[in-house]
Amino acid sequence: MAPYLLHVIERGVEDIPTGVIREASLPGRCCASSPRNSIRFPSRFILLRLSILPHRSPMLLVRWKPVLHCPPQGHPRRGFAWPRGPRRSLLLWRPIRSPAPAFLSISSSKFSQAGRARVRPIVRAGLAQTPSLSDVENAEILFSETLSLKRSQTVEGKIAVRLDPAGAEEEVSKWRLTIGCNLEGKWTMHWGVSYCDDLGRQAFEWDQPPPEMRPPESVLIKDYAIETPLKRLSSQSERQILHELQIEFDSNTPIAAIHFVLKEEETGAWFQHKGRDFRISFTDYFEVDNSVGGNQGFSIWPGTFDEISSLLLKAEESTSKKDDPDDEDGNVVKQNRCIAPIYKEFPILKEEFVPNHMTVSVRSSDKTDKNIVQFDTDLPGDVVIHWGVCMDDGRKWVIPSTPHPPATKIFRQKALQTLLQPKADGLGSWGLFLVDEGTSGVVFVLKLNEYTWLNNNGTDFFIPIGSVSSTTAEIGSDDIVHEQQAGTEIHDVRNSLSPNNSYPLQNKSLEASDPKNINMLPMKPQGAQEAKEAVAYTDEIIKEIRHLVTDISSEKGKRAKSKEAQENILQEIEKLAAEAYSIFRISIPCFVESVSDTELMKPAIKLSSGTGSGYEILCQGFNWESHKSGRWYSELRDNTKELSSLGFTVVWLPPPTESVSPEGYMPKDLYNLNSRYGSLEELKDLVNSFHEVGIKVLGDAVLNHRCAHYQNKNGIWNVFGGRLNWDDRAIVADDPHFQGRGNKSSGDNFHAAPNIDHSQDFVRRDLKEWLRWLRKEVGYDGWRLDFVRGFWGGYVKDYMEATEPYFAVGEYWDSLSYTYGDMDHNQDAHRQRIVDWINATNGTAGAFDVTTKGILHSALEKCEYWRLSDQNGKPPGVVGWWASRAVTFIENHDTGSTQGHWRFPSGKEMQGYAYILTHPGTPAVFYDHIFSHYQQEISRLISVRNENKIHCRSTVKITKAERDVYAAEIDGKLAVKIGPGYYEPPNGPTKWVVAAEGRDYKVWETS
Amino acid sequence: MEVGSAVKRAGAAVPEALLPSRSLGFRDSIKARTRTRCVGFQPPASGTWRKRAVRVARKGAVRSEAVLDEKAPPPMKKKEAGPVRLYVGLPLDAVSDCNAVNHGKAIAAGLRALALLGVHGVDLPVFWGVATAGDWTSYLALAAMARDVGLRLRVSLHLHAQRRPRLPLPESVSRAAASNPDLLFSDRSGRRHPDCLSFAVDDLPVLDGKTPMEVYEEFFQSFRFAFSDFFGATIEDITIGLGPNGELRYPSFPPSGSHRFTGVGEFQCYDKYMLADLKRHAMEAGNPFWGHSGPHDAPEYNQSPAFGKFFKENGGSWETAYGQFFLSWYSGKLLSHGDRLLSVASQVFGDLPVALSAKVPLLHWWHKTRSRPSQLTAGFYNTDGRDGYEAVAEIFSSKSCTMIVPGMDLSDRDQPQGVKSSPESLLSQIMRACKKHGVRLAGENYSLVGVGTTAFRRIKENILAENSRLDSFTYHRMGAEFFSPEHWPLFTEFMRSLMQPEMDSDDIPSSGERLSVMDAVPANDREMQTV
């Protein structure tokens, strides 16, 4: 009976068109129906029924996989994000101590997708209170925005392992092992061998393969393993991807087995076989289940790789040949080694990102005084909008007035959850909400299933309703999937179940076996009851373990029982851990669970483009000499971990393009990324390794000028080559050296090379394309823009909007004002120019705070610390006016290093860092200082900054600015003084303790 | 105490003797079965590994019996049976500073999960400042929770204060310290360390006419009285906190942000009483000038040894006669504090069927320099050519005290460059000293932060190492992070891999359906070949 049912379920999923699923009745009817009928019901209801069946017929018990390691389908990286998907939903439905979860064993991928807790009331279009589409069609659109969403999805693929003879007829000992994988990605095989010992038995350690066996690209990883990349085969037909690696070896080498795991470099994921290494064993001495080969025979897998199947035939032939008793090549070692052709495939799952869209439009309704908000998305499956409205200017979530759209639940009196209706064409879903005229906006996040939420880069989506103009910028585009922890929403499932629920038994089991209810709904009277039941349940499990212990040794007859108990245990452990986690989390301030109260009410830190998270610390990852070795990219790669542990979040890499000068600032062919710092491949590796340690990477984009490839007929170098083969129209007209035919420059001229005329459309188009290409090809997250004084900031805005950098900073460097060689106290004109530039970019990029550096020079060098406060008692640099766009620094490759154009007062560097690393703005630390004796002090200051959560918009209160000492309090959390003079922060209500100190500076934090 | 330890040793001898025959038997059965097994564990690499695996198995069986019949067996017996008992630390603030159980529900659930997972017991941190008025109800409640799910207890009696979470010293002590700040440790620039009382006042009647040692003893007695029902059956082990952070050391580095701390630390000998003692000592040594102050040329907390002359690699003051004089006095004060406190503890607890233990820090920064400054400032006179841990092991040995060493998860490779750190070689030095003096060793992880797969692998290596002397391992610490989906699966897998050989043929499904706890182990970001 059991197998029959399983079949039914699988067919049920396949055969029933979606329409039928929507129309199907609720569980009651399923129960009444006979098993034979069940095929007509949608899979999710079958699920429910099945979970009860075992009560009636315990014979149905099928062995199922333990919950601890759920079946792989549909779970990207499941080991790390355990409480997700079907498993969790199963937990909910499991009746007390019933063997119900049996149905888990039959989870094919289809099944589990269908089983993903979609037990929600189904909406029918056209119910009361729902404005219909026709209502909406002619209404005036007040606002419309398409959001792009990124969702993770698991793709299934295969790893194929093939072993076949490689040599010609006479070279029987030559064998070839082929590992193939048909998923997109950058695959590497991490492998080793084990050798036979003297008696021909095999050892089990990993060992390095003999040199002749290693393919040429192999890299030694450890003394027992090597890594070899898989090559992408181009010969495959277009939709077939195949990565392959071939290892040739001689069967006379005393290798007992080859072990390997596969690694996907882009995601860093490891792939193994049933939780352990793949093993290809060549001995029959000690057979382990895991071994892929040996003399177990092989099977031909029909399908995917046509080419392989034909090869397989060859393999077969050679097998028969090998089995021939006349074969003379057997030697002593071979007596218990046995190499036979193998071909096997193993399914694997990999996580990939899938883009989706959601369009939100606001229309005014002419029938009512309400606005209609329409959501339209191509996200597959059920999409729940978790939403609320805002009144006035605040961002506080308020529940909209009734009536609510159908299929809406109120979530903890804080928000509504509305299930969108499937679209007629089956591709996505939509919904219409009525919102009162008085509301200022709709805030929402999307919920795809219990554990997957989509939000707007960590904040909520916000749709303005009242005034359309103000807030559109808030809608980010680079959205990522947020996976929320289990346990947050589980009670919804129950709520949605109970109205239709005709089984008291099931309902009860639900409450009892789901301790999260207690946690989630502490106010409900049944909470205590549930808690008791849950405890009672665990007690029983523990009792069961004890019985198990007594039983285990004696009887085999109780096998089933023990297994059942064991599975219950595994499940119980996971459940308890999830419970403990959810409660512990609550006791920590600031965590995801309380999103609806704390997180949302605090003024959300506005994520503007180009400024990163606001908590960035920049590292200039090179100096003027870095090109000398010719392999800077690989050298820097050794330091990625250290930079990350020092606390840096963004690194600025040198200009990557081919350049006339080795430092890279005289670019020639923009698309040639082989520079004196290393090759394109090395650059990509470097960027990847920075990403692995969580550091964003800025590319140094030189947009102001470009060196020409050819001379024109007058012998002037102004004709470009390479992919961007511009002519003299791309060069500004006002530099006589280069005879450009473009417009006049929109900024200052850089006289060493032709300046690019950004006013030309084709130039801008080409540059945008180039920048986008850089982001995609290299993986840059943002830009450091060279010499932006040379062209109008408005063009930068254009470039930034086209490339959407995570962080961008421009070099706007001109001179401060001096009177008779003495720097003026008031440097407002200087910083005004920088601020004007930032303004011209519309704030899409920040700028280096040259003003602050200049003022620090004077203040420190001449002991004039009073300079560090402007007339209004604010910091005197850009940081005092527009801190979030100021990138503070004290030295870079031009000012310091071996050029020393404007070197920071020697020996006072730490005072400078004490200033910029405690103050708002985004501090940048120069490479030479990081790897100097200052490292520890800098590292200390960074950790103090991070521990106290100082960010680029922190507030500064200057408490002292005198001749020999400057002191300030930042956000009330840090106090800092620089200068030789005396200062101690006042010990009033706040107690200050020293957090860092060094020569002439001291930093305190609140205790 | 003497009797107790003798019994323990005798107990230890018997199972060890029995072991070979048992393990042989099991090995045979492995052979017999292998062909029919469809899920097996990867056979171990060497004979010794095999043997150890079997010992783990035996331990599992014995422990189950113990669960069955809770009251009957004294815990001592099975302690020696298995190589490593695994504890998990409860949150430091499981009982808050106002003496109430914190996150009780979460702990209850967590304890159950741990019990089901097969964890041996939990470490309950008890703070002097919390249970000071003899009110033990909250701690008793936690102990009962652990007992009720069948977990054992190790109780850590902490005599220091904690900054995060805030757990202060007893109020009477704080008051005394407020009126006489010299009761607390002080550094060269006069900053006080509010974590613990200066070792120099151990025997001075500074706390309402009582000496700190007397007060510690009262505290121990009070604990003993309150927990009398738990000893033996539930409480197996008492850890004595010998100094700041519960470790035998001076508070030589600032407690805040100490995980980022990489400097050398500072000497803590500038309170009135320490200075007086130093002076007296200098007089006795016939060189009164040495007694005026601590070394003037030592660097500050976060500086590297290169600052100042004291720790210089060659020709630093530490190698001079003065340096030797000062360092041996300074480390001697630490040792005698540890010695006396452990004597007090063994007087109080000696007749109970519990083991004593105490924690020694793993000060691995700068271990690769000759002067090893961070160990010197913490009170371990362990320099090039002088083994400072021998003396420590000797004291532990004389009190039959287990030495707890953190940092089982650290490896040299992952340490930041430039601080010449070497946790591995320091650990092996400590282990050598323990072996020489017959001191039992217990391990801890350094921190949950940053514990990833590699750290677990390192822990496992340490636990399963052939020459491992670990008889227990405490994993710190339960909390949100511990149960988080990033961490918990790693931990369960770690547990499972330790207990893997326990699988019986019964556990193996007969058909193609594979039941295996190792099935579908997350495939992400880990390397497989080590298990």
Image (cartoon, coloured by chain):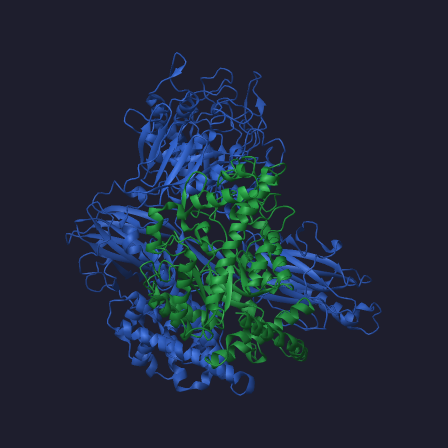
On the image, the x and y values in percent for residue A690 come to 52, 44
When the figure is inspected, residue A902 is found, relative to residue B193, above or below; the finding is above
In this figure, what is the number of numbered marks?
Answer: 0
Q: Is residue A39 among what the camera can see?
A: no
When the figure is inspected, residue B381 is found, relative to residue A88, above or below; the finding is above
Residue A206 location, quadrant:
bottom right
Work out whether residue B46 or residue A770 is closer to the camera in this orientation and state it.
B46
When the figure is inspected, residue B379 is found, relative to residue A38, above or below; the finding is above
Relative to A800, is A906 on the left or the right? Answer: right
Work out whether residue A798 or residue A587 is closer to the camera in this orientation and state it.
A587
Relative to B388, is A367 on the left or the right? Answer: left
On the image, the x and y values in percent for residue B249 come to 50, 51
Q: Which chain is green?
A: B
Relative to A640, is A606 on the left or the right? Answer: left
On the image, the x and y values in percent for residue A262 come to 60, 58
Q: Is residue B279 among what the camera can see?
A: yes
Q: Which chain is blue?
A: A
Work out whether residue B388 or residue A630 is closer to the camera in this orientation and state it.
B388
Residue B10 location, quadrant:
bottom right
On the image, the x and y values in percent for residue B300 come to 49, 38
Q: Residue at (67%, 59%) from the top-left corner?
A: A192
Work out whether residue A180 or residue A398 is closer to the camera in this orientation and state it.
A398
When the figure is inspected, residue A753 is found, relative to residue A149, above or below; the finding is above
Q: Residue at (20%, 45%) from the top-left corner?
A: A466
Q: Residue at (37%, 84%) from the top-left corner?
A: A34
For the C terminus of chain B, the quadrant is bottom right
